[in-house]
Image (cartoon, rainbow, N blue to C red):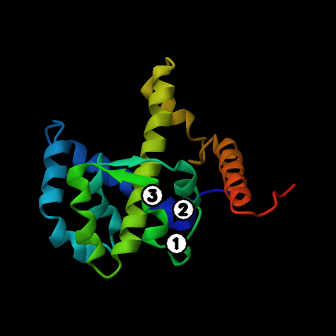
Amino acid sequence: MSISAYFEDLNKAYRAEIEDLESDSEGKNVLATRLGEKRAQFGLLMSMIEFAPEMVAPAFHGGVRFSDAQALTMLSFVEPEEFPSWDELRHAVQFEAWAAKLVPIALAEAGGERFLLTMICLEFLHAKDSNRFMAARDSGADADEAASAEEDGDGNRADADEDDVDLEEAGSDFLAEQGFDRRG
């Protein structure tokens, strides 16, 4: 299994948004300042959650911890019309105190649950991608080599088959825990 088309597209846009927020025109790291601005304007940004959640989700960047990677992996497989309710997945994450204050603001909006589920999955995928990149870098690979090693000449992930196996196994484990028989 691989991530849904919804998260495939949004994950790319979210990574680009985070990268765009990181530095100013002089190349200075201004991520903390820009994230602070997004958080201060969070209520005003709610009008964008339906058509550009990747622009609003960075308000939570760095404020979400994951306690159920399997549930978040399963979320990444589905399209929004198949999302579980927020109550079914809220156990999968914990928020920093400042981020927890944003949750009720989002939930008060039409589409707030969908936004929160989208946001936690985007943060999860971003963290997973960052961890993979850092592991490659820490193993002695140059950052450029690590980035290019993730893609083959056609822009496809070279390790996609490996990820698909891990995701498929995670999916099988999840379904087995829910009482379904394993495929085999």
Residue that carries the numbered disc 2 in the rendered image: 75
Where's the C terminus, which quadrant? bottom right
Instruction: Give amino acid for label 2.
Output: Leu
- The residue lying toward the viewer, choosing from 59 and 95, is 95
Residue reaching furthest to the bottom: 110
Q: Secondary structure at mark 1?
A: loop
Label 2 vs 3, first from the N-terminus? 2
User: At x 50% / y 74%, what residue is drawn?
Assistant: 80
- Residue 91's disc number: 3
The answer to whether the residues at label 1 and label 2 have Cβ atoms under 8 Å apart is: yes
User: At x 50% / y 67%, what residue is drawn?
Assistant: 6
The answer to whether the residues at label 3 and label 1 have Cβ atoms under 8 Å apart is: no
Please tell me how crowded label 2 is: few (under 14), some (14-19), or many (20+) other residues with Cα within 10 Å: many
**Does 31 appear above or below 86?**
above
Where's the N terminus, which quadrant? bottom right
Residue reaching furthest to the right: 184
Label 3 vs 1, first from the N-terminus? 1
